[in-house]
């Protein structure tokens, strides 16, 4: 990988690397030994800055992207590739984003160019520990920019996340590359043909990055809040357990089980990754003028009922079609 280092912030301004299909076969074990970069002057070890700081040593180039080469993977453990990330980000949505990138390469079979970095601004706070010596600045946001220039149609996308809890699916944080350029002042992919660059940097469509075989193929973004009064998206459902509420989302898959005598409507994400689902018990089938399994597939709907939990996943059991409303009816 390559990077531009910011001495003022004691971390990279940005990093760039290429994820190739080799990521599928790479099986080297993690290094887990953080090192000072020999090309970056340092007064002591950065370990003391991070120890008990409340922040993780967040990789910008993920080591798992380079597990096909010991030298390449070791270089990702240089502190020049590290930025302070809250555990909620580093171990949560950021890790999911890194996995999302590897899946698009694994199932798409092509290469993806990636630029990653913190949003560096004036006046950022520093890591404060008893032995801290480097004045490592703490970013409030991080970006990851992707370009696929090998496919039949070049495409691009970017992601922007807060340095904290990001509890929506990864695709909810997708933005056009242009917006990250305006935010950071960085001109991404400047060497690409201008017409291609303009096109890919204006795009923001996660769906075109999925490929057959990907277990998340077909997932949809939760409806962004705020929703109409009393209505919530599928991610927000977990905050209303035990209450009667209306949950809105897209029916992306259905599953009927003879054992449970029920039809399950998975909203926004497929089983077993769903954040919320709807149960229609077989004995309530006559209460519908249509077949919910086929009629509601791929439709955006709102479901009203008491939210309960089964196996840790919020759900609503509906009794009749009056408890399910099409989203277009809500919008009008």
Image (tube, rainbow, N blue to C red):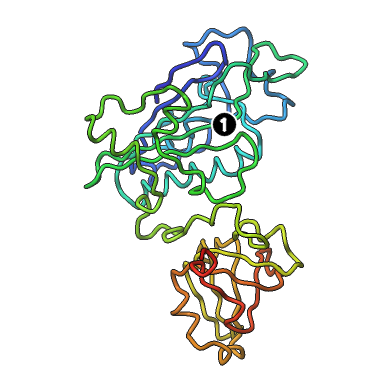
| Number of residue marks | 1
Q: Quadrant of the N terminus?
A: top left
Taking 161 as reference, is 35 above or below it?
Answer: above
Please report the residue visible at 55 percent of the width from the left and 16 percent of the height from the top: 36
Label 1, residues with CA under 10 Å away: few <14, some 14-19, many ≥20: some
Q: Is residue 147 left or right of residue 53?
A: left
Q: Is residue 108 left or right of residue 248?
A: left
Residue 240 in picture, x, y percent from top left:
72, 61
Front residue of 190 and 213: 190
Taking 225 as reference, is 259 above or below it?
Answer: below
Please report the residue visible at 42 percent of the width from the left and 61 percent of the height from the top: 218
Q: Is residue 291 left or right of residue 178?
A: right
Residue 238 in picture, x, y percent from top left:
69, 59
Please report the residue visible at 46 percent of the width from the left and 43 percent of the height from the top: 174
Residue 141 in picture, x, y percent from top left:
57, 31
In which image quadrant can residue 310 be found? bottom right
Front residue of 59 and 165: 165
Q: Secondary structure at mark 1?
A: strand
Front residue of 139 and 69: 139
Residue 205 in picture, x, y percent from top left:
39, 48
In which image quadrant can residue 260 be found? bottom right
Please report the residue visible at 26 percent of the width from the left and 25 percent of the height from the top: 191
Q: Which residue is mark 1?
A: 141
């Amino acid at each position: 990988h390559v990077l531009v280092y910011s001495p003022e912030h004691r971390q990279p301004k940005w990093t760039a690397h290429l994820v190739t299909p080799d990521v599928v076969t790479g099986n080297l074990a993690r290094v887990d030994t953080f090192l000072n970069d020999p090309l970056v002057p340092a007064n002591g070890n950065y370990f003391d800055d991070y120890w008990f700081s409340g922040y993780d040593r967040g990789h910008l180039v993920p080591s798992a992207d380079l597990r096909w080469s010991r030298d390449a993977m070791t270089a990702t453990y240089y502190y020049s590739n590290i930025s302070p990330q809250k555990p909620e980000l580093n171990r949560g949505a950021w890790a999911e984003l890194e996995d999302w990138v590897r899946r698009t390469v694994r199932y798409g079979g092509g290469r993806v160019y990636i630029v990653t970095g913190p949003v560096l601004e004036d006046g950022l706070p520093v890591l404060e520990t008893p032995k801290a010596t480097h004045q490592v600045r703490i970013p409030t946001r991080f970006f990851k920019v992707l370009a696929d220039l090998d496919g039949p149609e070049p495409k691009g996308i970017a992601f922007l996340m807060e340095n904290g809890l990001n509890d929506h699916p990864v695709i909810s944080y997708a933005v056009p590359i242009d917006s990250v350029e305006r935010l950071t002042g960085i001109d991404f992919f400047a060497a690409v043909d201008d017409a291609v660059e303009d096109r890919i940097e204006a795009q923001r469509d996660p769906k075109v990055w999925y490929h057959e075989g990907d277990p998340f193929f077909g997932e949809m973004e939760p409806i962004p809040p705020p929703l109409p009064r009393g209505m919530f998206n599928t991610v927000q459902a977990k905050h209303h357990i035990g209450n009667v509420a209306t949950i809105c989302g897209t029916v992306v898959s259905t599953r009927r089980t003879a054992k449970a005598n029920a039809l399950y409507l998975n909203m926004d994400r497929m089983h077993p990754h769903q954040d919320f689902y709807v149960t229609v018990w077989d004995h309530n089938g006559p209460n519908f003028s249509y077949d919910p399994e086929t009629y509601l597939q791929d439709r955006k709907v709102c479901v009203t009922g008491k939210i309960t939990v089964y196996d840790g996943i919020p759900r609503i059991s509906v009794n009749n079609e009056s408890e399910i409303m099409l989203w277009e009816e809500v919008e009008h």
